Image: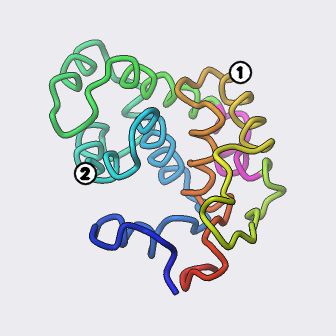
Amino acid sequence: MRCPWPQNDVLMTEYHDHEWGIPVHDDKKHFEMLLLESFQAGLTWKTILHRREGFRKAFADFEVYAVAQFTIQDIERLILDVGIIRHRLKIEAAIGNAKAFIAIQKEFGSFNQYIWQFTGGKPIANQFTNHSEIPAQTAVSNQLSKDLKKRGFKFMGSTICYAYMQAAGLVNDHLLSCQFRK
């Protein structure tokens, strides 16, 4: 049985079946997911996922060092880019978050080393049978949000952090009945 997911949306189905909840250990992929989740604040994941390629082009293929060097001219260019969410504060946050991401890499050796400490180095495997059981945030996402904000991240509230944790496989929230549960 499949997780209840928008079956009429091929992109969403592909994302669910082949990406969502699979543990990430690559810093570039972590940065991509953090950037996309930060833009999701107040929007649906479908809205972001359908603009993913636009984000990839606009944000230098999610190369954190390139994004950290973006200038005022880049911000103005991005505000005009119809392929992404054109929200000035989120765009500015993405650049600042890139700088904070690099600082974490320098402190911990990699962002991956940093992020997996929040779950003890392994995914939190939840045992949910119904989507209504899945929380929007947890004590761990609260802790992560607080730490990221302390390190300079923006648009990283607890709900966004939990969504990121799900996407990056730090949390496995596939329902027990889902054929893609690992």
Secondary structure under tag 2 reads: helix
Q: Is residue 108 magenta?
A: yes
Q: Please tell me the numbered disc located at residue 150.
A: 1
| Position of 3 relative to 34 (above/below) | below
Going from the N terminus, do you reach mark 1 or mark 2 first?
Answer: 2
Secondary structure under tag 1 reads: helix
Question: Where is residue 97 shown, x and y percent of the image?
Answer: 51, 28
Of 25 and 176, nearer the camera is 176
> What residue would you read off at disc 2?
53
Q: Is residue 131 left or right of residue 84?
A: right
Segment colored magenta: 104-116
Q: Is residue 134 magenta?
A: no
Q: Residue at x 57, y 34 (%)?
A: 101
Question: Where is residue 128 shown, x and y percent of the image?
Answer: 70, 69
Specify the amino acid type for callout 2.
Glu
Q: CA distance from mark 1 to mark 2?
A: 30 Å
Q: Residue at x 63, y 73 (%)?
A: 175
Residue 59 location, quadrant: top left
